Amino acid sequence: MRGHRVQARALLVQEDAPDIGLYNRVVPPDELAAVAREVPRVDLFVAEGVFYFLSGEQVRKLLQQVADTFPGASIVFDAQSPLFLWFSNWRQPIARARLKFAVRRPSDLATWDARF
């Protein structure tokens, strides 16, 4: 599986593109603006395993901030259906670790903002 990820990365990311590490956290808007000052062009954001724990409103705002700050950039993220969200929370033994974000259809994101 790792080989496929490496191949996909080679197709999506230029070899000389800088890797800006904003790992393991959601970036506040002011910090996103600071990244834009340092690296004015970002082609790809990856939010892997992040959005599950945010509300739909938080995800929408973050996507809008990325679109505002880095026009034309792509963002790749994983999401689950509302049914799987319910099932995941039903099976989750830790009450504080509830998942919040789900997407019924990817096209639903376009109703938030035409840039999505």
Image (cartoon, rainbow, N blue to C red):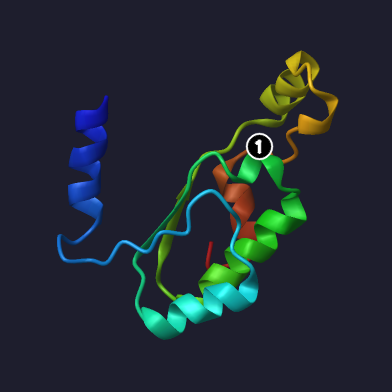
Q: Residues within 10 Å of mark 1 (few under 14, many from 20)?
A: few
Rendered view: 103 above or below 24: above
- Tag 1: residue type? Arg
* Vertical placement of residue 111 versus 3, above or below: below
Left or right: 91 as drawn, with respect to 2: right
Q: Secondary structure at mark 1?
A: loop
Q: Above or below — where is 34 with respect to 85?
A: below
User: Is 102 on the left-hand or right-hand side of 7?
Assistant: right
Which quadrant would residue 6 be assigned to in this image?
top left
**Viewer-proximal residue among 7 and 83:** 7
> As drawn, which residue projects farthest toward the right?
95
Q: Nearer the viewer, residue 113 or 89?
A: 89
Relative vertical location of residue 80 with respect to residue 8 in this rendering, above or below: above
Q: Residue furthest bottom?
A: 37
The part of the image, by quadrant, that contains residue 106 is: top right
The residue under the point 19% across, 30% down is 3
Could you tell me residue 101's position as x and y percent?
70, 41
Q: Is residue 69 visible?
A: yes
Quadrant of the frame with the N terminus: top left
Residue 68 visible here: no
| Location of mark 1 (residue) | 104
Residue 98: x %, y % from top left: 78, 31
Number of numbered markers? 1
- From the top left corner, tell me how far across and down residue 105 is, in percent: 60, 40
- The residue at the point 76 percent across, 48 percent down is 55
Q: Which residue corresponds to the image point at 78% horizontal and 16% vertical from the top-left?
A: 93
Left or right of 11: which side holds 84?
right
